[in-house]
Structure formats: structure tokens, C-alpha cells
Amino acid sequence: MIKKCLFPAAGYGTRFLPATKAMPKEMLPILTKPLIQYGVEEAMEAGYDVMAIITGRGKRAITDHFDISYELEHQIEGSSKEGLLKEIRHVIANCTFTYTPQLQMKGLGDAIHKGKVLVGEQDPFAVILADDLCVNLDGDGVLKQMTKLYAKYKCCIVAIMEVPAEDVDKYGVIEGSEIEEDVFMVSNMVEKPDVDKAPTNLVVIGRYILTPDIFSMLENTKPGKNGEIQITDALCEQAKKGMVVAYKFKGRRFDCGSVDGFVEATNYYYNLEK
């Protein structure tokens, strides 16, 4: 079983300035719960209990959130407010949290490579990007769906979705052949291609299951677009060996790294609560 889930959370969140000047973007709330807690709960549903978080400067709020606040607990003990801490208490009690910093912003691939000290070099692990908020009201969460698929294929799994052709330049794009319904054997991956050069409109979102050999791939991956080390480039090398499967997941994804997606997610969850 895969037990460790990595959360790259060192980015600056510049699209949400000035709100993210002093607050991590991963702590932006959808209603009353921060984005990263949604991701942790998704991982827990899939059977993971070790949450490895890549942090950066100004990210202390994340570590504080997944820790006990004795003063707060004392102040609201026995009051009507105490029940509001039920979910986060459950998370803290049932997970182990580990942290390491990404000192320079050198891309998602670099952030994942920094996670080697947390997830180890022997076992597969999952990756969740907290600002990709995923929900599936009709069954398993996205990571649980992918974890079941990993049990069958035993290789890297990436979550994909279809987007309008004019939006492919915002994502990593896959090319491959469908081997079963909604499951593709990947033959090529391109990071943020020009619209007229994209092989498909199937794009990778922030859910991955990675095998430990990804670390050696990342060590040999040269910086790509914007001088960053892209996980897409490393996965592309694995895809050439038939070692990457893409899964068109069941559910809905909100791009909470953008203001539009954040507002859309907030409205969606607000209507669920009504």
C-alpha cells in the first residue's frame, strides 16, 4: 500500500497578492476550510497517513494549522464552537506530518525532488497540488481512484482532463493510446505547448502517483520553460519506456490557483452546504 502523499507548498501565490503576501495560498479558505486541508482529507480517504509538505518562507501557518492550539482548545472547550474543530482534530490525530523547505523556486520537478528526504527512495508516493481542488460526490475521491489504478498497473499515474484547445498552453499535455475506458498509456508529454503544437487537449492536473525512480529522472532533467525543472519532462522520459498511465478521473476539478476558479469553488461548496 502507498502511505505517503507529498504536498508541494512553497510557491508564492502571486496571483492572489496582496492576500498571499503574509498568508500561504494553500491556507486560503474555501468556506471555512483551507485548501490544503481538503487535499489532506482526500489523501486520507485514499488510505494515506503520512503527509509530506514542501514548504518555503512565510509558510508557518501550514505547520500551525496541522498542530494542536492549546490556547484555542482551552478557550472554546465546552462551547458551541468546539465542534468546529472536529475535522481538523481527526486529521491531526490520524496523520503524521513532515516538512522540508524548497529554498529556491525552481519548478514543480525541483519541489518533488526535494521531497525525497520525506518520502524515501524505495516506495511509490502520491503528489497533491492543493490549489487543484477536486471533488467527486458520486463515489471515490480522485486520489483513491488513482490508487486503485496503481494497484493494477504498478507505474506512474497522472490525472488528466479535457480542456478547450485554446487552453492547452497552460498545462502539461499528454499523447497516448486508450488502453481501457478513460485510461491511456502515455507515449509523450509536453509542458505548456503552443496551442497549434499540442498533441491533444488532454492535460495533466495536480494529482500524481509516482514511482521512486522519478528521483533519478529529475536529477538528470534539465531546466525547461522559465528555467524551471518540470515534472512533465521527467515523466516524458518514463513514458518512452511505457511506464506512465494517464487517467481521466471521475469528478470535478477547480483551479483554485486562479481567482476565477477560487470563486467558482467557493460558490460550489456554499451551495452544497445550503
Image (cartoon, rainbow, N blue to C red):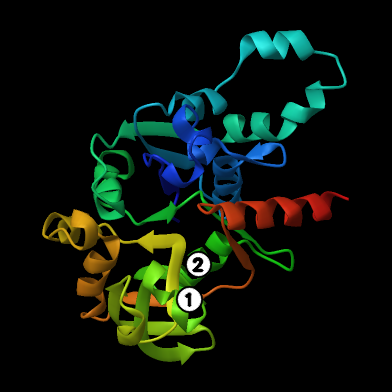
Q: Tell me residue 111's x, y (percent).
A: 29, 46
* Tag 2 and tag 1, C-beta contact below 8 Å: yes
The residue indicated by pointer 2 is 146
Q: Is residue 93 above or below residue 267?
A: above
Q: Is mark 2 on a helix, strand or loop?
A: helix
Asked whether 228 or 121 is in front, the reply is 228
The residue lying furthest to the front in this view is 18
Residue at (47% x, 73% y) in the render: 160
Q: Left of 140 or right of it: where is 146?
A: left
Q: Residues within 10 Å of mark 1 (few under 14, many from 20)?
A: many
Q: In which quarter of the image is residue 117?
A: top left
Disc 2 marks a residue whose amino acid type is Met
Quadrant of the frame with the N terminus: bottom left
Give me the residue at 72% from left, 8% from top. Answer: 74
Q: Distance between the residues labelled 2 and 1?
A: 7 Å
Q: Residue 93: percent from the left, percent from the top? A: 60, 29
Q: Name the residue under label 1.
A: 247
